[in-house]
Amino acid sequence: MSQLEKPIPMSSKRVTNLSGQANVPGDKSISHRSLILGALSIGKTKINGLLEGQDVIDTAKAMSSFGALVEKHKNGEWTVDGFGVGGFAEPKKVIDCGNSGTGVRLIMGAMSTSNITATFTGDASLNKRPMARITEPLNLFGARTYGRKNGQLPITVVGSKAPIPITYHTPVASAQIKSAILFAGLNSPGTTKVIEKEKTRDHTERMLKAFGANITSEQTTAGHIIKLDGYPELNAQEIIVPRDPSSAAFPVCAALITEGSDILVPNIGLNPTRAGLFETLKEMNADITFENENFQGGELMADIRARFSPNMIGVDVPPKRAASMIDEYPILSVVAAFAKGTTMMRGVRELRVKESDRIDAMAKGLKSNGLKIEEGEDWWSVEGREIDGVNGGGFCQTFLDHRIAMSFLVLGMASKHELVIDDSRPVNTSFPVFKSLMSQIGANFSILKT
């Protein structure tokens, strides 16, 4: 998304009776990892259901730059002919990861223990995000990293000529930190260990095991410990990407707050490390049910049915749940606005260093629509106005953040007055069919002329 392009404002008007089936795209976390692990494997990995948002496309381009053959086929399947662990070729150009913090952090980890040099950059939003949390452990492997003040992109990574395994205690709950270290550990001798205070989403561990790595995890008094043996031969796989629970959150939450609604969102990944939002919504008395539960590739999947829920209540979301729903707090705060009582969200400091400061962004936008918000460094609360109690009518800044943009568009669907966001372009980075999908179930979004 070029910063020279003009913003595209979009409005959201009140609707009722959302209905039908919302076929959300593939899981973004698994899509990134499928491409990277396909490149690190021997043979041709086949991927069905890949999320084709710009974030994932940028990761596909990066893997091509490092020497993998990445192709999309007419039937929608993607294939990756890999180069194997340690087989990275030095890229001829700067690796542009666009808006994707996941993409750039995981790729830096994967190449940091190969004897090559690569420079990474991104858009204006990504170039403001903290990268020292990744470069510090990568330097312990023997890599050298050179970037801007405060560890921000652009960053040049000089891969280690003789990597050494590390044991690393993650300073914050972050699957990106863990995954970057594990990917670096693939091309290191001995055993790499990651110790987390709180268990984070475990797609990387599950997928590494499926590709043939020797990886174990256990919960101990010292924390959640993951051990990975270096120098495995990873073998190509056939992957079916589950549909993204973070994307499913938007039609599900829209149905809960929109009068007369009843929708089905099929084939959603319900990995326990990703399902915190749905657990919280059920505590709020949301009418959500899971149908046709099954397992594919070690991941629990189900169809989610969501119905209008006029009697939701505010809850206190425990800090230990933050890692399992960190991307869903913005849309949760929208649901909280239509509940009775106050919803308190604690242990969410990580929201301040996402694509935007999401606590600040949501607080400003919710206040512009007549809501009462309080916030601290790692907490915030929303005072609910119950169903039919949110005025709307605000003008909301998105700060180039896709989840902020989509959350406010959902808010407008149940507010009394039309709501406008300043820029709808960021939505394409993670959910390119958002507007059309939501319109199919009954949303009324309109692009505004500037």
Image (tube, rainbow, N blue to C red):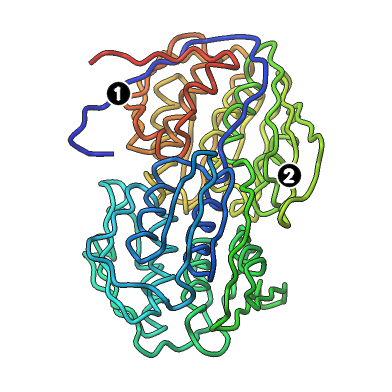
Indicate the quadrant where residue 5 lies: top left
The residue sitting at 55% across, 48% down in the picture is 326
Residue type at mark 1 is Ile
Disc 1 from disc 2: Cα separation = 35 Å
Q: Nearer the viewer, residue 278 or 242?
A: 242
Residue bearing the label numbered 2:
301
| Image position, residue 264 (x, y; %) | 71, 25
Q: Nearer the viewer, residue 406 or 98?
A: 98
* Residue 86: numbered disc: none
Q: How many marks?
A: 2
Which structural element holds mark 1? loop
The residue sitting at 71% across, 77% down in the picture is 221
Instruction: Answer above or below: position of 52 versus 185.
Output: above
Residue bearing the label numbered 1:
8
Query: Relative to 193, is 271 on the left or the right?
Result: right
| Image position, residue 432 (x, y; %) | 45, 32
Which of label 1 and label 2 is nearer to you?
2
Residue type at mark 2 is Met
Query: Relative to 139, is 44 on the left or the right?
Result: right
Image quadrant holding the C terminus, namely: top left
| Image position, residue 135 (x, y; %) | 36, 72
